[in-house]
Amino acid sequence: MTGTNGLRIADRKHIGLAEMLKGGVIMDVTNAEQAKIAEAAGAAAVMALERVPADIRRDGGVARMASVKKIKEIQAVVTIPVMAKARIGHFVEAQILEALGADFIDESEVLTPADEHFHIDKFAFRIPFVCGARDLGEALRRIGEGAAMIRTKGEAGSGNIVEAVRHMRAVVSGIKRLATLGAEELMTEAKTLGAPYELVRWVAANGRLPVPNFSAGGIATPADAALMMQLGAEAVFVGSGIFKSTDPAARARAIVQATTHYKDPDVLAKVSGELGEAMPGIETSKLAQSELLQTRGW
Amino acid sequence: MTAPARPAPVRIGVLALQGDFALHSQALERSEVDAVEVRKPEALADLDGLILPGGESTTLLRLIDEWNFVPALERFHATGKPVFGTCAGLILLAREVLHPVQPSLGLIDVAVERNAYGRQRESFEARGSVTLAGRAIPVDMVFIRAPRIRRVGPEVETLATHAGAPVMARQGTVVVATFHPELTDDLTVHRYFCDLVRTARARTP
C-alpha cells in the first residue's frame, strides 16, 4: 500500500479487498445451492470451481476453470464476493473471469497448469489475483507479478493440515529471517530466494508481506482453521473440508466462529462440539510426487 | 496537596469479528489513542468509542447475532459514546438497507444500497474532500464494492460527497463513510473521530 521501493505491486483498491476479507472464511462451492449455504453460514466470500479438490484428486483428468454457466448461477444468488479459479498461466481463462465480473481470480495449482514456465501477468487485469505459495520466495515472485493476496498452498483436497502448517511456517520464518539480515546481505538473499530485490528489502524493513497472507489446503475442522490463524494466517480458505463433510452447514458455521475466535479455546471447544464427521483425510507423505498439487507453480 | 490525576487514555474499540479491523487499530494508534479489538459484547464495557470496520456485512451480521451484540451496541450508543462505521460498518449502522433488504442497527437515519457501484471491477479511488468543523480538507477516497447512501434524514449532516452523492455523514455521535480512510496513510478522518470521542467523554461524568 505504501511504496515498495519503487516496484509496482497490486493496486490499493485490490489489496484493500483482500484486507476486507481478513478474519473470514472463503469457501469452495461448485453450485448455487452450496453458495447459498456458505453465505448463510457466514462465509466472507465463495470460490467457484467445477469440482472440489478432493474430487479432482479422485477423478483425475484435466481440471479447468468452472463453467461460465455455473459462475453466473453462483453470482446470481449471493451478495458476498465471488472468486473463481483459473489455471496457472491461462490468461484467457482470466480474461473470461474478468469479463464475467469475478471479484478475485485464484491462479491456482489445484487446476491443471496451462503453462509450465510462466504465471499470468496480473497487472494486465482490472480485477485482483490471489496466488498460492509454499515459501517466501514464491510469495514474493507472485506479488512481483501483481498478486493482491497470497495464500499458502497446503495440499488441497487432502483434509490433512500438515502441508498448510509447513508452508505457513516457511513463509513466517522466512519473513523473520529477513529482519535479521544486514543491508549488504539482502541482494544475495534476493538471488537465493528468486525474489525481487525491492520486495526483499521491503519485507526486511516491515516484517510482513506487502499484501495479506491467507492459508489454504487441508483445513477440515474448526481447530485446523484456528491453528492456521494462530500461526499467522490472516484468513482461511476451506475447500473440500466443508462440502465433503457430513453436515456442511454446521461445519461451515463452526469454522467461521473458530476463525474469528481463534485465540479463545472455550469458544473453539464449544463450536467443535456438535459437528458430524469431518472429511476423510489422506496421509500426504504417502502421496507420490506426481500426485502433489502444491509443486505446481514456478 | 496531590497533583491532579492524569486522565485515563482514550480507549476506542474496533469490532474484530471479521474485516479490516487491524488497519483501523493501526490508524487509531497512530492517532495516539488506545485501540482495543472487540470480539465479544462484554468487551464494550470500558470503551469510549467504537469503530465498525469494512468487511462483509452478511458475515458480520451472522456473528453479531450469534454473540447477541445488538443490545450491547444499542446501550453503548444510548450512553452517548461515539460510533464510526466504514463501508460494511455503515451498512450495519444505517436505518434502512437496500439491495438486498437486510436487518441493521438503525443508529443513523440514512438509507444505504449495498454494492451500489457493482463488483470489484468497478471499485475505484478518487481524490475528494471532507468538510470537518467547517473546514474542507482534501483526502484520498478508496471505494471497494462500496455501498451508496441513497437518502439522508433531516438530522443527518453530510460531511463529504462524491459525484453528487453523500459518502460521509454524521448524526450526533454516529459517523459513517462509504470509503476506507484506514487504507490510506492520511489520519484526517480518524483524528476527527478521536476528537469526537474525547468531547463525548468530557461531557459524561
Image (cartoon, coloured by chain):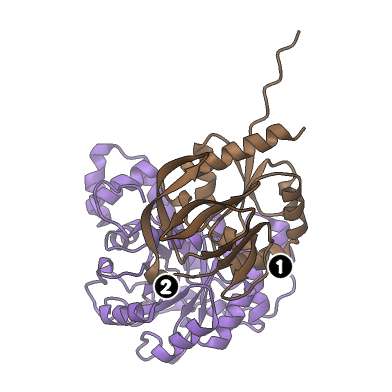
Labels 1, 2: one chain: yes
- Mark 2 chain: A
Image coordinates of residue B163 in percent, x first then y, are: 40, 61
- Which residue is the site of mark 2? A103
**Relative height, residue A75 to residue B76 (above, below):** below
Q: Is residue A271 visible?
A: yes
Front in this rendered view, residue B79 or A112: B79
- Which residue is the site of mark 1? A271
- Type of the residue with mark 2: Asp
Image coordinates of residue B184 in percent, x first then y, are: 41, 48
Front in this rendered view, residue A291 or A286: A291
Callout 1 secondary element: helix
Q: Please tell me which residue is depicted at 35% across the width and 41% down the height of the picture.
A: A205
Front in this rendered view, residue A118 or A125: A125
Which lettered chain is shown in purple? A
Q: Please tell me which residue is depicted at 67% across the width and 54% down the height of the picture.
A: B39
Q: Is residue A151 left or right of residue B204?
A: left
Image coordinates of residue A250 in percent, x first then y, are: 68, 77
Q: Is residue A49 left or right of residue B47?
A: left
| Chain B colour as displayed | brown
- The quarter of the displayed image where residue A84 is located: bottom left
Front in this rendered view, residue B117 or B11: B117
- Type of the residue with mark 1: Val
**Relative height, residue A263 to residue B190 (above, below):** below
Callout 2 secondary element: loop
- Mark 1 chain: A
> Would you call the spot at circle 1 few (<14 residues within 10 Å), some (14-19), or many (20 or more)?
many
Image coordinates of residue A71 in percent, x first then y, are: 44, 85
Which circle's residue, 1 or 2, is located before the other in the chain?
Answer: 2
Q: How many marks?
A: 2
Q: Please tell me which residue is depicted at 45% across the width and 89% down the height of the picture.
A: A70
Q: Is residue A290 left or right of residue A37?
A: left
